Image: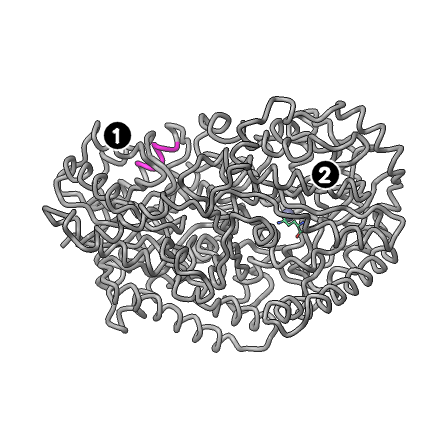
Amino acid sequence: MAEVSVVGYPRIGADRELKKVTEQYFKGAVSAEELTKAAAELRKAHWRVQADKGVRYIPSNDFSFYDNLLDMALTLDAVPTRYRELGLPPLDVYFAMARGYQKGGRDVKALPMKKWFNTNYHYMVPEIEEGTRLRLANTKVLDEYAEAKALGIETRPVVPGPLTFLKLSRLPAGKGLGDYQEEIAQAYVDLISRLAAKGVAMLQLDEPILVTDLSSFEIGIFTAIYSRLLAERSGMKILLQTYFGDVHDSFDAIAKLDFDAVGLDFVEGRDNLRLLKETGFPDGRLLFAGVVNGRNIWRNDYRKTLELLDEIRRVVETPPVIGTSCSLLFAPYSVRYEKGMDESYRRHLAFAEEKLDELRELAGLFDLSDRSRDERFARNQALLHEKSESQSFSFKEVRQRVAALTERDFVRTPSFEERYRLQKNELRLPLFPTTTIGSFPQTGDVRKLRKSLHDGEISEQEYVERIRSKIRDLIKLQEEIGLDVLVHGEYERSDMVEYFGENLPGFLFTQNGWVQSYGTRCVRPPIIFGDVKRAKPFTVAWITYAQSLTKRPVKGMLTGPITILNWSFPREDLPLREIAYQIALAIRDEVLDLEKAGIRVIQIDEPALREKLPLRKANWKKDYLDWAVRAFRLVHSGVKPETQIHTHMCYSEFADIIKEIEEMDADVISIEAARSDLTMLNVLRENNYSHQVGPGVYDIHSPRVPPEKEIRDTLVRMKERLDVGKIWVNPDCGLKTRSMEETVPSLKNLVEAARSMR
Ligand code: GLN
Ligand code: ZN
């Protein structure tokens, strides 16, 4: 039978055990020993389930306490001096790099965090300091292999490859990839020889960077490093694993190198098949064919997949290994936990565990000469047919509304400058207006409140009253702190996308469909099962209540269509553009209702705008930005000129899409800048960015309280580069993950800094 491989497995735990115990550790409630023990239990469970379900190539070292690239930074000794100097045990140095450290008079910021390719997972950006010498510095990869081995499970260690590591790291000024080529190759050679000595049969090196645009210089570095690794592989097999797209500019280089196995993604990298056909695949080499989508949750279409595998089979000598397109990190654990979900929906879903079943079934079917008679095949095809026939999730009026859109629906009038004047008059804000991004700390009591409502322990009415009392306290607090544009705090929202999905028919929800977003943070993406519409207003009552308590403007907070789309599991039977327009129309209705209810400032968050940007630049506009920008414009084009539209973006590079961001035509944008040393400011200036902007003045992903002077210095730098009348003062992102103890002093410092600037 064909063999089965998994690129990586989720690690947070089916019940988010890792998140919980790690957070306990942060609080000092469990010891390092208890933490490591809990982690080992999870690894064991994950290996076991894969072994039980017949996976032949099981990954190890896909586990991480926070992030795999951060793990690799430690493995390669890329630990900046400021963390080393803390003199902490290794695990705490690691967490200091991940989260910053502020204790006993010491104060170090976290490493920056960025989105992992076009996913909603965030990695920590390794920093290679001047003077750092990359070398093999710890045994994590070996230890986890040995741990599995002791359980009787043979695994394949998975390690970020050297090119991806270097390309995603921050190098010292003036240094380039070439400067590290030798030493990183040596470090990997050392790792390889240690693994080979342990009897490891195969090592997987993940090089997703190969699906992005690379220069011939970079491909040269790739070739040089890998020639060396392959020459010194000591009998161990090396699997070069790519995912998230095709490898068209490095395919020749890959083919020329003597890899034992190559992993290609045939779900997102359809061109890989063409490359295989045109260039061929060296005899004797093993192809790991990524055919089961690691990033979406729909059942695999066996007919299509088997046809694809047949095509692949014709051009490769050895039968391909049947695998996931990428790590299953991006999929929830199992539909088994979805007890509350109607079976008619549930049977269409495949989470990580179910994907293991699919892999095994596909492997079984692949070898059959007459598959159509097979019961597994018939069952699968009947299921898919049932979905395409189903009318229950199709709303004719939505389809018609989208079809009837004209150019005018995408344009807001008058121009920004004109609106700027009108809004100035309307809102009468001081220079350096202060605001926040929307959410305030979601303390235990708030989460409990939502749970009690959900479990029927309190009535809807009581819930509303208790949330309102939180809003009252928050409005008062913001007035005391002296903020200019207030927010209601988003207490009623568990998550900015989940909450919107819950209020828009067409979305489906899971009870336990958690996926890791960064570190210990998980989200439960909704599933876009059918056409999307808005049944009735759902944010208006909360926001107008908050506005009724104060004379200062309260910002209405909405999630934008692109973020909703990008943070959901989308249906696969409609173009993404069409789904985006459907959602945009639903949010547009909410915007207009907020305006009608007297809300003068409305923020439409698009933190995820960049996330699904095609990885190849040539495809950016036509495949994505053209319709993404239009979807956003559709949301707000109907408001009066006096209504001020804000948007918010975070945790990505925005430099290269700044023109498109401006084309979204929001009046104000708050944007992440604190973690990236305000390079954003230069970008805004160089591009003559003309709208109002609030570059975040402090990093909310860290528990650190920014001193007033630090914020003031930041504002001074902003003033030097931007039009002083267009600068807003705000944190980097929402405050929901912070505590009140950190938030209040931070915001006081922020207000104080703005005042001293005035
Ligand atoms: N308004 C949201 C909040 O404050 C924005 C969150 C985000 O950008 N991820 O929580
Ligand atoms: Zn944000």
Q: Along the horizontal axis of the image, is 737 left or right of 721?
A: left
Q: Along the horizontal axis of the image, is 632 left or right of 22?
A: right
Most prominent secondary structure in the magenta stretch?
A: helix
Q: Quadrant of the C terminus?
A: top right
The picture places residue 2, in percent across and down from the top left corner, at: 16, 52
What separation in Å lies between label 1 and label 2 (alpha carbons)? 48 Å
Contact? badges 1 and 2 (CB < 8 Å): no
Q: How many marks?
A: 2
What kind of element bears circle 1?
A: helix
Hey, which quadrant is residue 521 in on the image? Answer: bottom right
Report which residue position mark 2 lands on. Answer: 592
Dot label at residue 274: 1
Q: Residue at x 38, y 65 (%)?
A: 336
The picture places residue 255, in percent across and down from the top left corner, at: 23, 35
Residue in front for this viewpoint, 404 or 277: 404
Start-end of magenta stretch? 218-223
Label located before the other in sequence (1 or 2): 1
Badge 2 local density, few (<14 within 10 Å), some, or many (20+)?
some
